[in-house]
Amino acid sequence: MKLSYWRFLIPLAFQITIVASVALVPLSIVLTGKTVILRTTAFDPYELLRGYSQVLNYEFNLLENLKKLPGGKELEGNREFYLIFVAPKNTNSVPPLPWQPIEIVYTLPQNLPPDRVAIKGKLIGGYIADYGIEKIYIPETEREQINQAVNEANRKQEGAVEVKVGRSGQAILRSLWIGSSRYEF
């Protein structure tokens, strides 16, 4: 009985394509996305089923803060939107200065200046905005050190994250800045 290699190779190639396509979007954002620094505070440091994590909170997570921005008055329900950020004037400081939210738009902007970026968000429950960058998982080996640094940063209000933002507005967390220390993940 002669077995055809194609009967094995075609399903294998199909499975590899499916698995690779799942990782393709985040990989393209990491490789080609724009780096943005966002000010944050951390809370809820442990999730039993998922291991050690930090849930991050941003000023622009709250609907009341978003409504103060141009375009924010129309924000309600579970609506998707894009929050436009502008880069700080000084980009060479350590720790880096955070980008500032300046406007809310409801369609993806196509021609933003180089010092601006749009991050896609969605209102959850009508009053909290989710951007997909609210949780960071911390390696077990650095858990105690990072937790102590996060607690100190919360007292001083100097925590920040570095994210990569793709052309579609999707953001991916890359690292955590606590004071002048950077923790990559």
Image (cartoon, rainbow, N blue to C red):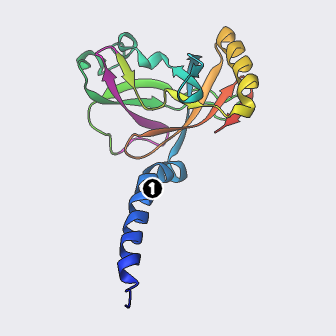
Quadrant of the snapshot with the N terminus: bottom left
Residue 88 appears in the figure: no
Residue 175 drawn at (x, y percent): 62, 35
Residue 181 appears in the figure: yes
Quadrant of the snapshot with the C terminus: top right
Q: Is residue 110 above or below residue 144?
A: below
Q: Quadrant of residue 152?
A: top right
At horizontal 23% and vertical 19% (from top left) the residue drawn is 77
* Amino acid at dot 1: Leu
- Asked if residue 64 lies left or right of residue 182, the reply is left
Q: Is residue 152 above or below residue 179?
A: above
* In magenta segment, residue 169: no
At horizontal 36% and vertical 70% (from top left) the residue drawn is 11
Q: Residue furthest front?
A: 1
Number of marks = 1
Residue for badge 1:
24
Label 1 Cα crowd, 10 Å radius (few <14 / some 14-19 / many 20+): few
Q: Nearer the viewer, residue 164 or 126?
A: 126
Q: Residue furthest bottom?
A: 2
At horizontal 46% and vertical 38% (from top left) the residue drawn is 171
Q: The residue tagged with tag 1: helix, strand or loop?
A: helix
Q: Nearer the viewer, residue 174 or 125?
A: 125
Region rendered in magenta:
111-127
Residue 122 drawn at (x, y percent): 32, 27
At horizontal 53% and vertical 32% (from top left) the residue drawn is 87
Q: Quadrant of residue 89?
A: top right
Q: Nearer the viewer, residue 70 or 11?
A: 11
Q: Quadrant of residue 12?
A: bottom left
* In magenta segment, residue 121: yes
Residue 135 drawn at (x, y percent): 52, 28
Q: Nearer the viewer, residue 155 or 104?
A: 155
- Asked if residue 129 lies left or right of residue 133, the reply is left
